[in-house]
Amino acid sequence: MTFTPMIEARNVGKEVTLGQETLTILEGISLQVKVGETVALLGASGSGKSTLLGLLAGLDLPSAGEIFIHGHSLGALDEEGRARLRAEQIGFVFQSFLLLPTLTALENVMLPAELRGDRDAEPRARALLERVGLGERLHHLPARLSGGEQQRVAIARAFICQPALLLADEPTGNLDSKTGARIIELLFELNRQHGTTLVVVTHDPVLAGRCERRIEISAGRLLEQEVA
């Protein structure tokens, strides 16, 4: 019996053009992530980790190679198709949060579920915000929240549709150790209860240590893969 991996990258490269210069950000990236696996992407700043995460989410397309999400080739889908796949299967925690400034914390978290037509979006969003310690901040706009609070709203938003794949860019980066520990527990609870595949870019040794596999990227190339 063969099992379709949640993620498969085949010889993926990414180049960008800056003026007359072509800059190689990723080169020859090949990897597989099994359904339900937890993986940490490690590496120095500028090594290409966040770029790879964005490619895996279909937010951008590679310059070379191919990426499959649960058997679906991202390159074979148009922009609308990739957006639909993200809405149905992928949660994403951005390093810059990308909260909508005119929506409250509660409304930001509810939005993906509402767009999907879920009728219980509000109680689920309230429960998630309680769990990340923001039960008293439901009706605050992002501008009235600290950076750490905005990050927790973004994490709750990524959780609300119970995605099959959660991609997170430094999910504990702006949090104190106590709140970071709470978020780490939430991530792995999602993995345990729903079989959610986790891929996290992190510098947090505690978070990386909880993952089943650690993949190091250096200067746009996979350096090594370490299994816990």
Image (tube, grey):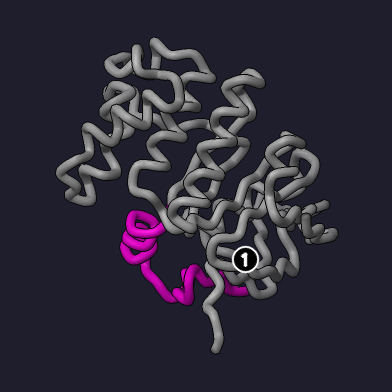
Residue at image point 53% right, 67% down: 6
Q: Quadrant of residue 194?
A: bottom left
Whether residue 165 sits left or right of residue 157 in the image: it is right
Q: Can you say which quadrant of the picture contains the C terminus?
A: bottom right
Could you say whether the residue bearing mark 1 is in a helix, strand or loop? strand
- In front of the other: 199 or 38: 38
Q: Is 166 drawn above or below residue 122 in the view shown?
A: below
Q: Does the magenta run of residues contain 130?
A: no
**Residue 62 location (% of width, % of height):** 59, 64
- In front of the other: 221 or 126: 126
**Residue 92 location (% of width, % of height):** 47, 46
Whether residue 129 appears in this view of the structure is: yes
Whether residue 209 sits left or right of residue 5 in the image: it is right
**Residue 117 location (% of width, % of height):** 17, 49
Whether residue 22 appears in this view of the structure is: no
Q: Quadrant of residue 130?
A: top left
Looking at this view, name the residue that lies furthest to the bottom: 1
Counting the numbered discs, the total is: 1
| Residue indicated by mark 1 | 33
Residue at image point 44% right, 32% down: 154
The segment highlighted magenta reads: 64-90
Q: Does the magenta run of residues contain 83?
A: yes
**Residue 57 location (% of width, % of height):** 50, 56
What residue type is disc 1 on? Val
Q: Is 203 drawn above or below residue 41 in the view shown?
A: above
Say few, some or many: other residues with alpha carbon within 10 Å of mark 1 (under 14 / 14 to 19 / 20 or more).
Answer: many
Q: Is 208 drawn above or below residue 165 in the view shown?
A: above
- In front of the other: 116 or 228: 228
Q: Is 196 drawn above or below residue 94 in the view shown?
A: below
Residue at image point 48% right, 71% down: 70
